[in-house]
Amino acid sequence: MKASIAVLAGDGIGPEVTTESRRCLAAVARLFHHDFEFLDLPFGGAAIDAHADPLPERTLSACRAADAILLGAIGGPKWSAPDAPLRPEQGLLRLRKELGVFANLRPVIVHPALVDASTLKAEVVRGVDLIFVRELTGGIYFGDKHRDAHSARDVCVYEVTEIERIVRVAARLAQARHGRLTSIDKANVLETSRLWRDVTQRLMAREFPAVHLEHMLVDAAAMHLIHRPRDFDVLVTENMFGDILTDEASMLAGSLGLLPSASLGEGARGVYEPIHGSAPDIAGRNSANPYGAILSAALLLRHSLHLATEAAALEHAVADAISAGALTVDLVSANRRALTTSEAGDAVLSRLPQRA
Ligand code: IPM
Ligand code: MG
């Protein structure tokens, strides 16, 4: 197939890890006889410097025209002064909103070779295989904001239709997995959460009676995630709770650098990015873990291009590389040499099947 992929490498380690995910996509294209066209576009802090806009119009229109968007990471101290007029994060939020990618899938799978890499006990994390479905274009991130000398406020709004569409995505996933859905809210305090709970309860009873639904308060969820993470299958939650809990959940897998994400809307087009940030402290050293970015490329193959075999081949290559101990500094054990970012990319490329 022919596909056009917009590449928004961004800031910090974004370009380094995106180089590797793009190499993997190019290799998959060669191997399986596809024709992928890559288009590099300015985004984030780099775009503030070059164009005084974290999401230049050209970047946005190219993303709209692309089949999928491969994103690295954005941000850094250079653009984070409290009084900064433009922030890289504004570009990311606008991109999500403009493209309508309301469903952010964040799978957390603990690789058997990495059960000792987590700060949690091996017997707690062994076998964890869960997926977060985070609402991505609503809630407190996008409500009215106000600041004056005496006070500040961020308004949290959820429409019924926004809740329904994200819960449907999560319920369909649960149906295809182990049939269990945990909906996370703060219904004991927040009105938006009480709406979330009612809408979820009604929709699940009406449309997905066979999926087992449980409601959990976000504080309890934060605890249970590290207490008994194996009990979870699919978790659905609003934007900010999802942001916080997925960083927490990444530690089950051993490193933030391992986790991919897919942000999807109504159509096939999606935004694919590792969940880690731009890590300015290690940028430019060729030491970042590219596996989260490469696994995001696999999600791109699966969800936007509907190339399930190719996606699985890339995921297997990453799993094989990890099994063989091909690890970057965030994960390597004391007696082994850490691979550089590009060596880790090579380790994956060399484990792709030699022919389709
Ligand atoms: C994420 C990030 C973003 C978010 C930031 C960079 C705006 O933390 O994708 O999880 O909060 O959504
Ligand atoms: Mg986050």
Image (tube, rainbow, N blue to C red):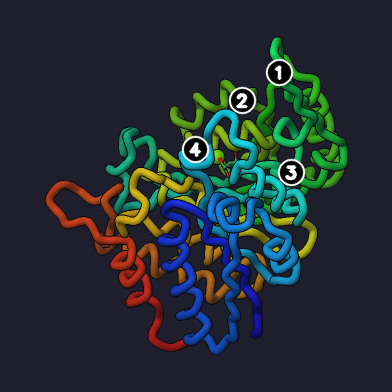
Instruction: Name the residue type under label 2.
Output: Val
**Residue 208 in picture, x, y percent from top left:** 79, 46
Mark 4 in CB contact with mark 2 (< 8 angstroms): no
Q: Is residue 143 visible?
A: yes
Residues packed near mark 4 inside 10 Å, few (<14), some (14 to 19) or many (20 plus): some
- The residue that label 4 is drawn on is 247
Secondary structure of residue under mark 2: helix
Q: Nearer the viewer, residue 99 or 229?
A: 99
- The residue that label 1 is drawn on is 152
Instruction: Pick whichever of labels 1 and 2 is earlier in the sequence.
Output: 1
- The residue that label 3 is drawn on is 137
Q: Nearer the viewer, residue 194 or 62?
A: 62
Residues packed near mark 1 inside 10 Å, few (<14), some (14 to 19) or many (20 plus): few
Secondary structure of residue under mark 4: helix
Task: Report the image quarter containing ligand 2.
Answer: top right
Instruction: Name the residue type under label 3.
Output: Thr
Instruction: Pick whichever of labels 4 and 2 is earlier in the sequence.
Output: 2
Instruction: Name the residue type under label 4.
Output: Asp
Marks 4 and 2, how far apart at CA: 14 Å
- Which numbered disc, 3 or 1, marks the residue closer to the eye? 1
- The residue that label 2 is drawn on is 218
Instruction: Pick whichever of labels 1 and 4 is earlier in the sequence.
Output: 1
Left or right: where 278 falls relative to 336: right
